[in-house]
Image (cartoon, helix red, strand yellow):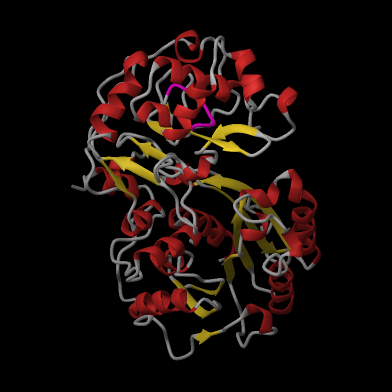
Amino acid sequence: MMTATIANQLELFKPFKLINFGLINHNFTFVDLFSGIGGFRIPLEELGGKCLGYSEIDRESIEVYQTNFSSFINSDEIDLGDIRSLNELPFDEIDVMVGGVPCQPWSIAGKSLGFDDPRGKLWFDVIRLVEKNHPKSFIFENVKGLTEPRHRESFIYIIDQLKEIGYQVKHDVLNSYDFGLPQDRDRVFIVGIRKDLEDSSNFAFSKPASKEPKLYDFIQGIECRNLTKKKFSSEILFDGKIPASRGRFQQNDELNDFFTFADIRNGHTTIHSWDLIRTTQREKLICQTILKNRRKKIYGQKDGNPLKFEILEKLIPNLNEQEVEMLINKNILRYVQAQGYEFVNSKISSGINGVSKIFLPHSNVISTLTATGTRDFVARVSLECQEPNEYKKMFIREIYKKRRFKPISAQDYARLQGFPEWFVIANNENIAKKQFGNAVPVPIVRYLAKALLKIIL
């Protein structure tokens, strides 16, 4: 059951309501590039904007876009089609140009080909369209990967080109969590204002002061109960050595509020395949030995090497091949010809038995929603236990084995991206998830646009 908390959270951003945009007095215009399903359009129209035209080539996204905005589309609004075919647009003045430029060329989830990917070259079309049509301002969004060292040269080129064609340009990486959404989603936003406009250099990125969102505020069918967490020393949680890989939403003195299913990593809330089925202490020792040594460079240059029996018998006293074969029979290990033994579950993204992570209802965030989908789930109930030695065992017993967890639905995706309740999603669940995974978080756009409009208007 949804709680009143979500309403309180969204009140920070003036929740969007289904209104007759045809009756309001428009005070600015915008063009919606790479419009997708309308993540930019929703907050811009709510702020009083009139869409002059939209550009999108994915037919399924266009269907959803038109379903939601057809009653607001005026006779003079134009379906602009493919951005690669556009040049000078038939509009007297464009106040704001927006777009979520395709991110796959810059994402670690893609092949990271940058400008060598045809989709990466779409930035050239964006720059050309801005130069030809001179909008007063623009807001463009992309993955954080565009700003990282491997793509830094390309990113600087994009920014410099936008500056050279007459714009004051600023950029920042913003996280959805800071704008009231319980999703760990970093995205770079590029904001430009035409230099001939007064105060064009005055735009500044800032973050709203929001309450901490929780998953139970946004996802239906999970328990709504906050827990006061105990504090622990690093000696208790990490044997005194805090892993450098811990992220922003993992407290170093608290138990994690999610569980990761992976045989190739370790941690106080990491679930291994040998934790889920009946295994002896000796079998667990063999698995842990492989886990601790598989990444050592003395055994190979891969980020995870199969280990030969000759190596294992030196690491594990009195080891015999029958013991290793038993773990193969249990589908925990496999033998790679001429290389050695490795885990069957050897990819973090694949998880174990189709599960990558299970988040507890009181978690502050869930992992980034993607177009390709995730193997993340949410527990239906909270976990009272906060004793480190029992935490994982109780989770397996009370939540995992009793199947007290649920997949994240397309409607959950919509809420986690800040889309309003009136928004009509695609009929196909997988298509809807893909569309929301590609979408821009609505509250961030609204916040940026509000700040931008104060200057250009």
Looking at the image, is 311 positioned above or below residue 336? Answer: above
Extreme-left residue of the structure: 1
Residue at the (59%, 60%) spot, across then down:
455
Residue 409 drawn at (x, y percent)? 32, 55
Where residue 441 appears, as percent x and y from the top left, is: 46, 55
Of residue 440 and residue 271, the one placed in the foreground of this image is 271
- The answer to which of 107 and 38 lies nearer the viewer is 107
Residue at 57 percent of width and 36 percent of height: 335
Residue under the point 37% across and 15% down: 388
Residue 86 appears left or right of 58: right
* Residue 183 rendering spot, x and y as whole percentages: 43, 45
Residue 83 in view in this figure: yes
Query: Residue 443 sits in which quadrant?
Result: bottom left
Given residues 333 and 323, the one toward you in this image is: 323
- Look at the image and give the residue range highlighted in magenta: 263-268
Image quadrant in which the C terminus is located = bottom right
User: Dominant secondary structure of the magenta stretch?
Assistant: loop
Residue 287 visible to an observer of this rendering: no
**Image position of 141 (left or right of 255):** right
| 368 sits left or right of 231 in the view | right
Q: Residue at the location (59% across, 52% down)?
A: 109
- In this rendered view, identify the residue nearer to me: 371 or 97: 371
Expressed as whole percent of the image width and height from the top left, the position of residue 383 reads: 27, 27
Q: Residue furthest bottom?
A: 75
**Is 42 left or right of 298, judged from the image as shown?**
left
Q: Is-magenta flag for residue 304?
A: no
